[in-house]
Amino acid sequence: MHLTPEQLAAFDRDGYLFFPSLFSPQETQSLLDAVPELYSRREAYNVREKGSDAVRTNFAAHLVSEPFARLARHPRMVEPVMELFDEEVYMHQFKINGKMAFEGDVWQWHQDYGTWLNDDQMPTERAMNVAIFLDDVNEYNGPLMFIPGSHKKGVVDAKHDLTTTSYPLWTVDNALIAQLVERAGGRRGGIVSPKGPAGSMILFHSCLVHASTSNLSPWNRVSVYLSLCAVSNHIRRFKRPEYIAHRDFTPIACLPDDCLVKPYPVDVPWKDGMPASALQTSSVPFADTRQAA
Amino acid sequence: MHLTPEQLAAFDRDGYLFFPSLFSPQETQSLLDAVPELYSRREAYNVREKGSDAVRTNFAAHLVSEPFARLARHPRMVEPVMELFDEEVYMHQFKINGKMAFEGDVWQWHQDYGTWLNDDQMPTERAMNVAIFLDDVNEYNGPLMFIPGSHKKGVVDAKHDLTTTSYPLWTVDNALIAQLVERAGGRRGGIVSPKGPAGSMILFHSCLVHASTSNLSPWNRVSVYLSLCAVSNHIRRFKRPEYIAHRDFTPIACLPDDCLVKPYPVDVPWKDGMPASALQTSSVPFADTRQAA
């Protein structure tokens, strides 16, 4: 799969690309079937909604579950990102966001790269967000909303919101959001919201400002969100636990295109539990640690 | 304005009717201009969002503000309701719901008639909800969602939710919502969400199950929600304050069709403040009170 010149231009202008039905129902189902067992685990990597047992975010499923380990190496996902960066990539984050029927709470307006810079000391924006729908996404189950072109602003001011939801987030100020939406076309295109069947994929720039509302519908909206970082752009400190921000910078080696429907062998090192080291953190950049040693 | 046989059939089947752009931009603006002064009043009738100064619901504006007093007597709104009930109507509730940009919180799934029955002892469902958009409503600013046909179920079980938002609400159980949505067509029409320009109007049955998500967009979604009750169906007790559930059962006398653009005289008895009596409540049906006297 190669990106067309039109796709490259659209990504540069808008900050995202949408690929409806990129994965087949059978491929998607193999992933969806593995979710309940993952969510049932009482591990730090399952963050639950405020005052509820519903999972808001599951981290690092690609280290625990074989179907997700295969997705993490899928050429239909990884190759376009390598093409955009003209470099190999590693897995920086791997999340399954529940946004469960009736329970799924809002995600306030934010950029992802701000966190990666501030917390993880990732040097530049050369990391890509990928969203893969495991359920159909419609206007009622809390779809992602983007402000097209907002990635052109680079990292914008944000404040650390610790109270709105169960997950702390660096959120962007309302006045700036209003300004960015106006600049992007206001009521005519200032906010967009790609919707489509399970198996659809969105690539979006790590500085693209995005949000999603709560899900009051009876339809789950489970999505995989992962972040592929150019290898040369790997993070420089381990301030966040390893299950959130990964520490293995090995370039991803893709599996064949049919890897979600055939049982290619794949490594799932946390299958029987997360190592204690995954919880260890340090606020000191590790380059400095090496010098000190 | 007379309803067509198709409209009457649609209302019976779906439980709502949508009238896009029923009021002109000039008419809508006369109302919108009066909102900030209303919201600025520190009165019990302004209920604010949890942890915020934004107004969630303003009650009884038709007793305080001339433009809203005229809207309360507008033939384009009142006549179709009288036609549906084949009877004169009085104003049971008059709300302006803020759903303000960035701040507007969810309204969980609920029916209105359940509250009117349980709290106000309104004998039957012969009361109509009317929504009038004062701002454009789009998929991003928390539009109303309906489950078509759910009014046919009559009053369904509900529990009193006192914690989710700043406004207590009798909300419907998730399993029942899922069932009603499935029955209404599931992913093909099981939830609908009329959207359109400011000045649009929705009439919806007092048993129609409805909800709305939060408003994360930079666009206010101010709407007037009012309830017109058939005069013979007036409430039988005053358990809620008068600014919420009105006690004047006089039939509405309509003004001329141009009443939002010409200054017809109209009475606004609470203009200079709400009388103390509006806060007095009683859990005893007033028929009984009379017998006891």
Image (cartoon, coloured by chain):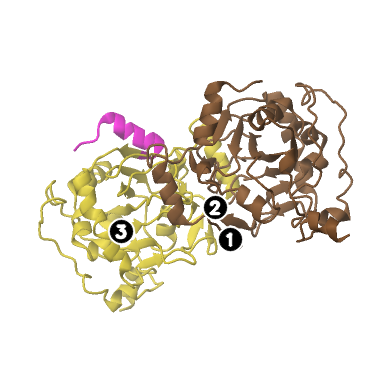
Chain colours: A brown, B yellow
Q: Name the disc covering residue A205, or none.
A: none
Residue B87 visible from this viewpoint = no
- For the point 38% across and 42% down, which residue is it? A186
The kind of residue tagged 1 is Asp
User: Could you tell me the amino acid type at mark 3?
Assistant: His
Would you call the spot at circle 1 few (<14 residues within 10 Å), some (14-19), or many (20 or more)?
some
Report if the CB atoms under discs 2 and 1 are less than 8 Å apart: yes
Q: Which residues are magenta?
A: B1-16
Percent position of residue A115, x then y: 64, 53
Task: Estimate the x, y position of residue A242 in percent, counting from the top left.
Answer: 79, 51
- Along the polypeptide, which appears first: circle 2 or circle 1? 2
The chain identifier of the residue carrying mark 3 reads: B
* Viewer-proximal residue among B114 and A153: A153
- According to the picture, the residue beneath numbered tag 2 turns out to be A108
- Pick whichever, B213 or B266, lies toward us: B213
Dot in front, 2 or 3:
2
Is A71 rendered above or below residue B168?
above
Label 2 SS: strand
Is any part of residue A263 visible from this angle?
yes
